Image (tube, rainbow, N blue to C red):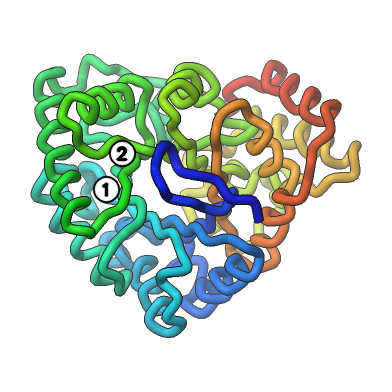
Amino acid sequence: MRMRKIGKSDLEVSELCLGTMTWGTQNTTAEGHAQIDHAKAAGINFMDTAEMYPVNPVRKETVGDTETIIGKYFAERGDRADWILATKIAGPSGFIGPEGITPQTLEARLDLSLKRLQTDYVDLYQLHWPNRGSYHFRQMWNFDPTTQPPKAEVLDNMRAVNEKMAELQKAGKVREFGTSNESAWGMAQWLRIAEETGGPRMQSIQNEYSLMCRYYDLDLAELAVHEEITLLPYSCLACGMLTGKYDGGKTVDPKSRLAVGDGTLGGRANDRAWAAVDAYTAVAQKHGLNPTSMAIAWIMTRPFEAVPILGATSVEQLQMSIDAEALTLSDAVVKELNALNKTHPLPF
C-alpha cells in the first residue's frame, strides 16, 4: 500500500482510509473488528470515525457507539500505535448539543471520544461541520449565507477554538486538526487565523466527493493545491449507488442503507441520479472493470491530494474498494468518466 502525508503534517497514512460509520447499526462489533483486521492486512493504517457515529439512522441513544467498538478493538489487539486514528466533533445538533464547537466543547467532547476509543490521543481531530452551517448534506439547493451569524462572531469563535486547539496539541491529546463539510471561505479563514496566531493549521478537509458529487473540483481544489490541504472524501460510492447494486432502486437488500435509512440515501436517490449511475456503471462494464473499484480509482486520478474513505458493511464489499489501490485507469476510461459529468451534472 502506497503511503502519503496529510497536508503539511508528519502524519503518514495509507492512500486509502477505513471508514466506520455503519458500525453499531448496520454492523455488529464483531463485523467492525473483522473489517479492521482485513484493512490492516491489506496495508491500511488510517481509520476515520466520529462522535456522532453510527449513522443509518443517527440516534441520540447510539451517539459514540462506533468509537466504543473501535476502543474495544484496541483494548483486545493492543495495536493502537499501528493506526493513524481520526475522529470528529459535531457542530450544532439536536442529538449531541446545540452549542456546537466552542473551546469548552472541543476539549470536553474530545475527552469523551478518547475514553470511548480507549486511547490517550487522536492523530487527526476534525470539526464535523461548521457552527455557521454549510451547503453540504444536500443543503446547496437553498443555500443562503445571509442567514449565518455576523462575520465578526464567526471569526471570534474560530480564533478561540484555534487557541484551544493549540492547548490540546501541546498537551499531547491531538496531533493534527482538520475540517469537514467546510467551504473554501471557511477553510481560508482557518488557515489565515493559524498563520496570524502561530496556532495549529487545518491539514485536511473531509467533504463528500465522488463521480456524482464534484463540488470540490473548483474553488476548494484550487485552495487545496496552493495551501497543501488533503481531501478525505466520504461517500465515494454515492452511498453505494455507484456499485450498481441497487439496479435503479429496484433491487434493495433489506440490510442496505437504502432500506434502513430514510429511503432516499440522504436525498441522493432520484430518477436523475439513477440515470447517472447507469451511465457510470456502463463505462465499467464496457472496459471490464468492477464499478466499485473504478469509482474509487477515479478519485485517485484527480489533480489534488485525496485519500478516499472506504465505507462498507462487509469484508467482501471492503475488498472491492481496496482493489482500487492496484487499479490504474486508462486515459480512455478517465476521459469517458469525466465526460459524463457534463451529461449528468449535479444529479443529487
Camera-side residue: 232 or 7? Answer: 7
Q: Which residue is mark 2?
A: 129
- Helix, strand or loop at disc 2? loop
- Residue 54: x and y, percent? 40, 61
Residue with the mark numbered 1: 90
Residue 131 place in picture, x, y as percent = 21, 35
Horizontal relation, residue 42 to residue 265: left or right: right
Residue contact at pointers 1 and 2, CB within 8 angstroms: yes
Comparing 199 with 344, the one in front is 199
Name the residue at 62% across, 63% down: 43
- Secondary structure under badge 1? loop
Point out residue 348 in the picture as x, y percentages from the top left corner: 55, 30
Q: Which mark is residue 327?
A: none
* Residue 180 location, quadrant: top left
185 or 82: nearer the viewer: 82
For badge 1, the amino acid type reads: Ala
Instruction: Please tell me which residue is depicted at 62% across the width and 31% down the height of the picture.
Output: 212
Could you tell me the amino acid type at mark 2? Trp
Label 1 crowding class (10 Å Cα cut-off): few <14, some 14-19, many 20+?
many
Image side of residue 32 versus residue 58, left or right: right
Quadrant of the image occupied by residue 195: top left
Considering depth in this image, is 295 or 115 the residue closer to the camera?
115
On the rendered image, what quadrant is the N terminus found in? bottom right
